[in-house]
Amino acid sequence: MEPIKKLSSSYCPHCRSIKLAAKDSRAHSAFGFLTTKRRKVCPKCDYRVTTIELPLHLAEEIFQEV
Ligand SMILES: [Zn+2]
């Protein structure tokens, strides 16, 4: 299993050469806990991705099953 921190890498998975720019970030409350939703875009190839932060205990629960 790969380290969890690799999942939050902000390099573009498409062109791999440049850092993604955070375009939008806002707090989001769902399922009884607070998350942060970020929209990122690659300024080079226009790749877009949305990331959601989870509480660590929840993330560990989810990713240990993969
Ligand atoms: Zn890119």
Image (cartoon, grey):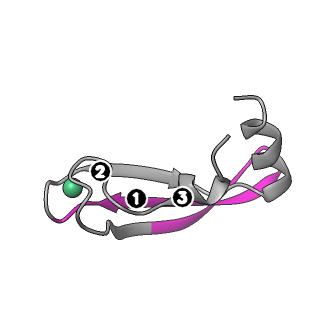
Dot 1, crowdedness within 10 Å: few (<14), some or many (≥20)?
Answer: some
Which mark is drawn over residue 39? Answer: 1
Amino acid type, callout 2: Arg
Q: Report, in whole angstroms, how far the alpha carbon at label 3 lies from the one at label 2.
A: 14 Å
**Residue at the left extreme, as displayed:** 44
Image quadrant where residue 5 sits: bottom right
Q: Which residue is mark 3?
A: 8
Among numbered discs 1 and 3, the one appearing first in the sequence: 3
Q: Which is more foreground, mark 1 or mark 3?
A: 3
Picture residue at 25% right of the left edge, 47% below the top: 14
Whether 22 is drawn above or below 56: the answer is below
Q: Report, in whole angstroms, how far the alpha carbon at label 2 lies from the one at label 1.
A: 7 Å
Whether 56 is drawn above or below 31: the answer is below
Is mark 3 in CB contact (under 8 Å) with mark 2?
no
Q: Report, in whole angstroms, how far the alpha carbon at label 1 lies from the one at label 3.
A: 13 Å
Among numbered discs 3 and 2, the one appearing first in the sequence: 3
Dot 2, crowdedness within 10 Å: few (<14), some or many (≥20)?
Answer: some
Residue 46 placement, left or right of 35: left
Picture residue at 25% right of the left edge, 67% below the top: 18
Give coordinates of residue 25: x percent, y percent. Answer: 48, 68
Picture residue at 48% right of the left edge, 60% below the top: 9
Q: Which residue is mark 2?
A: 48
Q: Which residues lie in the magenta part?
A: 25-43
Amino acid type, callout 3: Ser
Q: Main secondary structure of the magenta part?
A: strand
Give coordinates of residue 36: x percent, y percent. Answer: 61, 62
- 48 inside magenta stretch: no
Element class at badge 3: helix
- 26 inside magenta stretch: yes
**Residue at the front extreme, as displayed:** 1
